[in-house]
Amino acid sequence: MGIAQGTLSEIEAGKAKPSFDMIYEIKKHFDIDLDWLIMGDIYEEHNSIEYELLQKFRNLDPLIRNEVLEFKILRVKKDK
């Protein structure tokens, strides 16, 4: 992944924080969820219904995702 051992040691020791680029490379390399990588256990505490909804949304065709988002935007404007 191109992370120097010294840099990794400093991050593990809490002396440095990883850059966004480094976090993204870790996400790609290990094919893990970026939210989980950044938020850890906090992410896992989400309500199971929210998690299921999020997973179903992510599995939608991109065009349908946009329709869902447009509907939500219209709904928020209507509720104001």
Image (cartoon, rainbow, N blue to C red):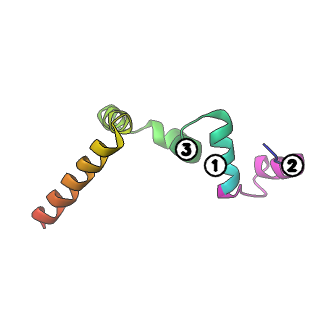
The Cα atoms of the two marked residues, 2 and 1, are separated by 16 Å
- Magenta-tinted stretch: 5-20
Q: Position of residue 30 (x, y in %)?
A: 66, 34
Q: Is residue 55 above or below residue 8?
A: above
**According to the image, label 1 marks what residue?**
24
The Cα atoms of the two marked residues, 3 and 2, are separated by 21 Å
Which residue appears at 22% of the width and 59% of the height? 73
**Which corner quadrant holds the N terminus?**
top right
* Furthest residue in direction front, as rendered: 63
Q: Callout 1, which amino acid?
A: Tyr
> In screen coordinates, is 45 left or right of 16?
left
Indicate yes or no whether the magenta region holds residue 14.
yes
Q: Are marks 3 and 2 in contact (CB under 8 Å)?
A: no
**According to the image, label 3 marks what residue?**
34
The kind of secondary structure element at disc 2 is loop
> In screen coordinates, is 78 left or right of 25?
left
Name which of mark 2 and mark 1 comes first in the sequence. Answer: 2
Q: Callout 2, which amino acid?
A: Ala
Which residue appears at 71% of the width and 55% of the height? 18
Q: Position of residue 16 (x, y in %)?
A: 76, 58
Label 3 CA crowd tier, 10 Å (few <14, some 14–19, many 20+): some
Label 1 CA crowd tier, 10 Å (few <14, some 14–19, many 20+): some
**According to the image, label 2 marks what residue?**
4
The kind of secondary structure element at disc 3 is helix
Q: Are marks 1 and 3 in contact (CB under 8 Å)?
A: yes
